[in-house]
Image: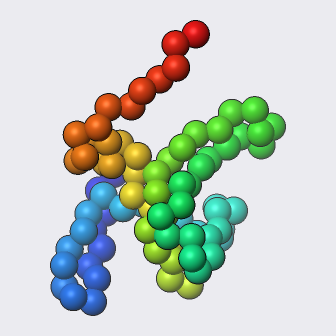
Amino acid sequence: LITINTFSEGIPFKDFIFYGKNSFQISCIGNSGCPVFSYLQNLKTMRLSGIHIQSDGDFSELLPLNIILSKGELELVKPSH
């Protein structure tokens, strides 16, 4: 998935994911920087999707976790069971 968004300054950013109210995912003003989760209806399985970037009307955008980890040269630490 590759998306490209251009801000008013003309700077292109890519790899954002757009989501909206039709997918039952909503955000509000002030949510920028917050984690974005997805979950199954039974609420037993939850997944961190990325970080909320901005909202514009009915649409919001997030920066996916895999982009954050790869561009930041970070490694996801998983608990051992």
In percent of width and height, residue 8 lies at: 27, 89
**Residue, x 77% and y 39% (percent of image)?**
43
Extreme bottom residue here?
8
On screen, residue 75 above or below 18:
above
Q: In the drawing, does residue 28 fall left or right of residue 54?
A: right
Residue 58 visible within the image: no
Q: How many marks?
A: 0
**Residue, x 24% and y 68% (percent of image)?**
13
Q: In the drawing, does residue 28 fall left or right of residue 79?
A: right
**Residue, x 46% and y 74% (percent of image)?**
54
Q: Say which quarter of the image contains residue 57.
A: bottom right
On screen, residue 77 above or below 54:
above
Q: Say which quarter of the image contains residue 41.
A: top right
57 or 81: nearer the viewer: 81
Extreme right residue here?
42
79 or 8: nearer the viewer: 79
